[in-house]
Amino acid sequence: MDPATLKSLGTILLWGVLFFVLMRFGCGAHIMGGHGHHGGQGGGDDAGGTVKDPVCGMDVEPGKAAAASVYRGRTHYFCSTSCRDKFEKDPAKFAAGTEAQATHGGHHHG
């Protein structure tokens, strides 16, 4: 290979590595929900990952939730409007479990 071809390949490789690093650890990680965040538990505001629907227990991505409701200053996300409607009829019944998980940090032991 001639020096011009090697220089071109080196430049392409350098840009490829830079692109990978930025997508993995920089701005691209925010877009893709990266930085090692794991889904939260308990229906609170969570920028990335999933939260539990307090009615049925299904994992829900806050940005894609079918419905949401605020109770005691905390936003709860739901997989469907019917789950939200059940929650709003008796929020204390369903929010009690999510508040306990949030107080404990949302981690499960065992």
Image (spheres, helix red, strand yellow):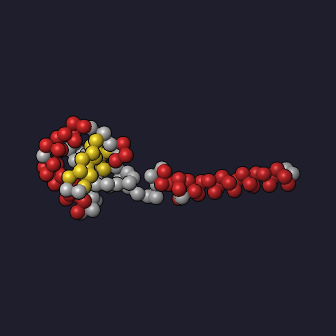
Q: Residue at x 13, y 51 (%)?
A: 92
Q: Which residue is drawn at 28% across and 54% down?
A: 44
Using the rendered image of the protein, determine whether residue 53 is visible from the camera's viewpoint.
yes
Asked if residue 32 lies left or right of residue 101, the reply is right
Q: Is residue 17 above or below residue 89?
A: below
Asked if residue 82 lies left or right of residue 62, the reply is left
Q: Where is residue 106 in the image (x, y as percent from the top left)?
A: 27, 58
- The image quadrant that residue 97 belongs to is bottom left
Q: In this view, does 103 lie above or below 13?
A: below
Q: Is residue 105 above or below residue 71?
A: below
Asked if residue 2 lies left or right of residue 28, the reply is right
Instruction: Tally the numbered discs.
Output: 0
Q: Position of residue 93 (x, y in %)?
A: 13, 49
Q: Which residue is drawn at 28% across and 59% down?
A: 107
Using the rendered image of the protein, determine whether residue 110 is visible from the camera's viewpoint.
no
Q: Position of residue 96 (x, y in %)?
A: 16, 54
Q: Which residue is drawn at 53% across and 53% down?
A: 28
Kindly give the residue lying farthest to the right in the view shown. 2
Of residues 3 and 75, the one nearer the viewer is: 75
Give the quarter of the figure containing the C terminus.
Answer: bottom left
Q: Where is residue 83 in the image (x, y as percent from the top left)?
A: 21, 40
